[in-house]
Amino acid sequence: MMTDELKAKLKLCRLSGVSEHYEHIINEAKEKDWTYDSFLEVLLDQEIIVRENSRFQRLIKQAKFPTLKTIEQFDFSKAPYLSKKEITDLLDNQYIEDKTNLLFLGAPGTGKSHIATSLGIEACRSGKSVAFYTAANLGNILIEMQDEYQLGKFLDKLKKVDIIIIDELGYVELSRQTTHLMFQIFSERYERGSIIITTNLEFAEWTSIFHDERMTAAILDRLIHNSKIILFNGESYRYRVQKND
């Protein structure tokens, strides 16, 4: 049995994984006559697992995904317009290391948000920080931060995030003030960090979101450079799934 003194020392050292699994590991070590090295290694393995799980849960919470949708839950047979390999190749998170943007274009219900969310979750699993916003929500936050003289602090926070996901760009028209503020995000992350954007509009229609043609061109220039564009063209994935339930 673990002594109270040992429990206190493990707590002091913040070794919750060791503390939680100590009893059954030491019993297994005695039963199988492990060496001291083997016993210590298994204990440390459990500590690493617990810490990784804790970090993953913390990153998921910080990302503020509206729903948790994984790539395993996506039925590619209902989305024949997508290349499964092209999507699953992104799960290694190399695009994050390369500071590449991902732009998902297509009609509503074709799976853009699901794939974007699943990539964000996979990034969290690898220890990457993620911030998820709808375009409308991000616009509101930017205006609020500016009104409260907290915009600089908010933008500095976004600079440190590994991936920003902006969902549903084009569903709500943005004000000119919001457009200028969002342009700051795109400019500051240009070649410095990845952005994932989902939109129901083709690039030629983006002027309807950002109003000014020059501003739209500047935004597109920063987003498209060093980007991967994936088209979600086809019958609604959501409709196909519901139809077959």
Image: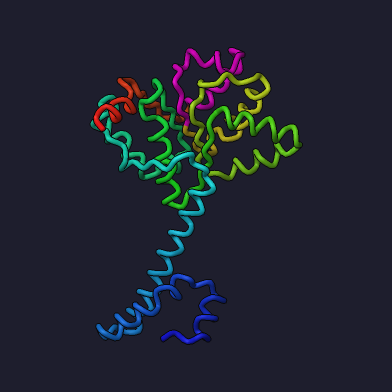
Q: What residue lies at 38% left-to-right and 80% top-to-bottom?
A: 23
Q: Nearer the viewer, residue 124 or 240?
A: 240
Instruction: Answer with left or right where residue 158 lies relative to residue 144.
Output: left
**In this view, 25 is above or below 175:** below
Tell me the quadrant of the picture where the N terminus can be found.
bottom left
Q: Position of residue 20 (x, y in %)?
A: 43, 73
**In this view, 103 is above or below 128:** above
Q: Nearer the viewer, residue 60 or 100?
A: 60
Tell me the quadrant of the picture where the C terminus can be found.
top left
Q: Main secondary structure of the magenta part?
A: helix
Instruction: Answer with left or right where residue 235 lies relative to residue 187.
Output: left
**In this view, 103 is above or below 153:** above
Q: What residue lies at 66% left-to-right and 19% top-to-bottom?
A: 176
Q: Which residues are the magenta region?
A: 197-224
Asked whether 220 falls inside the magenta stretch, the response is: yes
Q: Position of residue 63 (x, y in %)?
A: 52, 44
**In this view, 5 is above or below 154:** below
Q: What residue lies at 57% left-to-right and 18% top-to-bottom?
A: 173
Instruction: Answer with left or right where residue 78 lies relative to residue 104.
Output: left
Asked where in the image residue 86 lies, by quadrant, the reply is: top left
Tally of numbered tags: 0
Asked whether 204 falls inside the magenta stretch, the response is: yes
Q: How is the image coloured?
A: rainbow
Q: Position of residue 114 (x, y in %)?
A: 39, 35
Instruction: Answer with left or right where residue 43 lies relative to residue 129.
Output: left
Asked where in the image residue 52 lies, by quadrant, the reply is: bottom left
Q: Position of residue 167 (x, y in %)?
A: 49, 30
Q: What residue lies at 29% left-to-right and 83% top-to-bottom?
A: 34
